[in-house]
Image (spheres, helix red, strand yellow):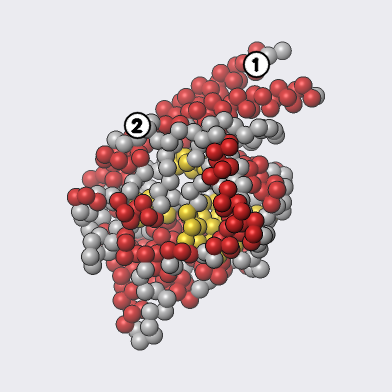
C-alpha cells in the first residue's frame, strides 16, 4: 500500500510538472491600478492588437522566490492575527462548474486553508445531491456548507429586459452577476463575518499562499483586494458609463452632499478630461473585501442605481466593471490592495507560475492542471468580433489613438484562445503519455 501511494504521488507530481510547463506561454504579470493609470497597461496577450502573446512573460518562480515575495505581507498579517473571515464560491448550473469547484476547493485547502481552517460557503443555483455535498465537503479541512439561491429577477424589471441570451450569456449568468455585485453582501449566511474572500469555481491556487489575506486587509486598514486589472469588452458595457455619471450627478445635486460618492481614483480611469469611465475592470474571480463596505450606504446607493437601470440583464453589465467603479469611486487608494504575489490560475490569467510542483501532491487532486489547461480554450466565452464590439461601444465612446483598450479584448481573443489551445494540447499529450505509462506499469 505504501509503495502504491508513493507511485501515485510520483505520477501526480510528474503530471503537475508537465502541466505547469505547458502553462508557461500564458504566464504574465498581473496588472495593477497604478500600472493601468500610468501607462494604460494591458495584459501581454492584448498587446499589438492581440498579437502580443509571444511567450515573453516572466519565467516560472521557484518555491523560495514565491515565499520570499510574500514575506513582508506574511509578517504584517501575522501581527493582525486571525480574523472573522469566510471564503465563498458561487456554483452555477453547468456540470463543468462542479468539476472545477472540486479542484478549486482541493487546491485552496492544500495551499492555504488546511492550516487556517476558515469556513467555506458554496452558494448554488440547482439542488445538490447529498453525495455531491459530501464529496465536496471532504476536500476541505475546515467547515464547508451549502446554501441554495432563489435567483429571482429584480422586482419591477420588465420581462422583456431579461431575454434568454445577451451576447451569448444566458440568464443564469446574468443572475450571477447581480448576486456577485449586490446581493452577496446581504446573505444571511455571512452574518457575523467581517471579511469575505470570493473565488470563482475555476479559480486555482498553484502554490502555497503563506499569509492570511483577511489579516492583511485588517493590518492594512483596507476594504478591498483584487488580483488583476483588465479591460471590459465594449459590447457588454454599453450604457454603463452614462449610468454611473447619472448617479454621480444625482448624488452631487440632490442636496445631501456627496454621500461618499465623490470620485477619487476614478479620475485616473477616464477617457481624458471630462470623459467617462475608460473600461477598466477588476478580475473578480479572486477578490477579498470587508463586508461592511459592501453594506455601506454609498455602495448600496450605487448598486441600487445600476440595478434599477436594468443593464445587467438587458446588456450584460458585469460584476468586474461594477466592482472597479465602486472601489475607485468610494475608496481611497490606500484602502485597496493588489494581491500580485499569489500563484494563481483563472482561465487565461496565469500569474506567479511555480517552476515546479510543491512537494507531496497527495491526495491526487480531483482535477489536475493538465485537464485545466486542456480546457482553457473551451472555457473562453465567444464575445462579439472586434468590429462589432467597437461599433457598439456607445457609452464608452471612441478611445484615443494611444489608449485603444476597449474592444481590444475581443481582437485579442483569437490569439489568446490559440495560445491556450496550444497549451491545452500540450497538456493533453502529457496526460495521455502519463496514462499510457501507468497502464504499462506492473
**On screen, residue 210 above or below 336:** above
Residue carrying label 2: 54
**On screen, residue 393 above or below 297:** above
Q: Residue at x 43, y 67 (%)?
A: 332
Q: With 428 as the anchor, is 387 left or right in this view? A: left
Q: Residue at x 74, y 26 (%)?
A: 5
The spot of residue 436 in percent (x, y) is 60, 16
Q: Residues within 10 Å of mark 2 (few under 14, many from 20)?
A: few
Q: Nearer the viewer, residue 62 or 146?
A: 62
Q: Nearer the viewer, residue 147 or 244?
A: 244
Q: With 97 as the anchor, is 156 left or right in this view? A: left
Q: With 31 as the anchor, is 429 left or right in this view? A: right
Q: Secondary structure at mark 1?
A: helix
From where the camera sits, is residue 316 visible? no
The spot of residue 388 in percent (x, y) is 25, 47
The spot of residue 252 in percent (x, y) is 33, 80
Q: Nearer the viewer, mark 1 or mark 2?
A: 2
From where the camera sits, is residue 117 visible? yes
Answer with the quarter of the image where residue 98 lies. Answer: top right
Residue farthest toward the right in the current orientation of the protein = 1
**Number of marks in the rendered image:** 2
Q: Earlier in the sequence, mark 1 or mark 2?
A: 2
Answer with the quarter of the image where residue 190 lies. Answer: bottom right
Q: Residues within 10 Å of mark 1 (few under 14, many from 20)?
A: few
Residue carrying label 1: 439
Q: With 3 as the anchor, is 247 left or right in this view? A: left
Answer with the quarter of the image where residue 212 lies. Answer: bottom right
Q: Residue at x 56, y 43 (%)?
A: 68
Q: CA distance from mark 1 to mark 2?
A: 36 Å
Q: Secondary structure at mark 2?
A: loop
Amino acid at each position: 500500500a505504501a509503495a502504491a501511494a508513493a507511485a501515485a504521488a510520483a505520477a501526480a507530481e510528474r503530471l503537475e510538472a508537465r502541466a505547469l510547463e505547458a502553462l508557461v506561454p500564458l504566464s504574465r504579470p498581473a496588472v495593477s491600478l497604478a500600472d493601468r493609470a500610468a501607462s494604460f497597461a494591458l495584459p501581454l496577450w492584448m498587446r499589438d492588437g492581440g498579437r502580443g502573446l509571444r511567450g515573453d512573460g516572466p519565467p516560472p518562480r521557484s518555491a523560495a522566490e514565491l515565499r520570499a515575495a510574500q514575506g513582508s505581507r506574511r509578517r504584517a498579517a501575522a501581527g493582525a492575527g486571525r480574523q472573522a473571515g469566510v471564503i465563498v464560491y458561487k456554483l452555477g448550473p453547468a456540470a463543468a462548474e462542479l468539476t472545477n469547484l472540486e479542484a478549486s476547493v482541493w487546491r485552496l485547502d492544500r495551499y492555504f486553508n488546511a492550516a487556517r481552517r476558515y469556513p467555506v460557503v458554496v452558494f448554488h443555483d440547482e439542488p445538490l445531491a447529498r453525495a455531491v455535498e459530501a464529496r465536496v465537503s471532504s476536500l476541505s479541512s475546515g467547515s464547508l456548507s451549502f446554501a441554495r439561491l432563489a435567483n429571482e429577477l429584480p422586482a419591477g424589471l420588465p420581462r422583456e429586459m431579461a431575454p434568454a441570451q445577451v451576447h451569448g450569456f444566458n440568464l443564469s449568468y446574468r443572475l450571477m452577476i447581480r448576486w456577485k455585485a449586490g446581493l452577496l453582501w446581504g446573505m444571511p449566511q455571512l452574518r457575523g463575518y467581517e471579511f469575505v474572500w470570493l473565488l470563482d469555481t475555476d479559480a486555482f491556487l498553484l502554490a502555497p499562499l503563506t499569509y492570511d489575506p483577511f489579516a492583511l486587509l485588517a493590518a492594512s486598514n483596507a476594504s478591498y483586494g483584487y488580483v488583476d486589472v483588465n479591460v471590459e469588452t465594449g459590447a457588454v458595457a454599453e450604457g454603463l458609463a452614462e449610468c454611473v455619471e447619472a448617479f454621480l450627478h444625482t448624488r452631487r445635486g440632490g442636496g445631501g452632499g456627496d454621500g461618499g460618492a465623490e470620485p477619487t481614483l476614478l479620475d485616473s480611469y477616464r477617457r481624458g478630461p471630462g470623459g467617462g469611465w475608460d473600461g477598466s475592470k477588476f478580475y473578480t474571480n479572486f477578490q477579498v473585501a470587508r463586508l461592511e463596505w459592501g453594506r455601506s450606504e454609498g455602495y448600496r446607493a450605487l448598486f441600487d442605481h445600476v440595478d434599477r437601470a436594468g443593464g445587467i440583464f438587458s446588456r450584460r453589465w458585469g460584476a468586474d466593471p461594477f466592482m472597479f467603479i465602486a472601489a475607485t469611486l468610494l475608496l481611497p487608494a490606500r484602502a485597496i490592495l493588489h494581491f500580485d504575489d499569489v500563484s494563481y490560475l483563472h482561465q487565461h490569467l496565469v500569474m506567479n507560475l511555480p517552476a515546479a510542483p510543491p512537494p507531496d501532491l497527495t491526495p491526487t487532486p480531483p482535477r489536475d492542471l493538465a485537464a485545466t489547461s486542456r480546457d482553457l480554450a473551451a472555457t473562453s466565452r465567444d464575445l462579439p468580433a472586434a468590429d462589432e464590439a467597437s461599433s457598439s461601444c456607445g457609452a464608452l465612446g471612441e478611445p484615443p489613438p494611444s489608449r485603444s483598450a476597449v474592444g481590444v479584448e475581443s481582437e485579442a481573443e483569437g490569439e489568446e484562445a490559440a495560445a491556450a489551445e496550444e497549451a491545452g494540447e500540450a497538456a493533453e499529450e502529457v496526460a495521455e503519455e502519463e496514462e499510457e505509462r501507468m497502464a504499462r506499469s506492473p
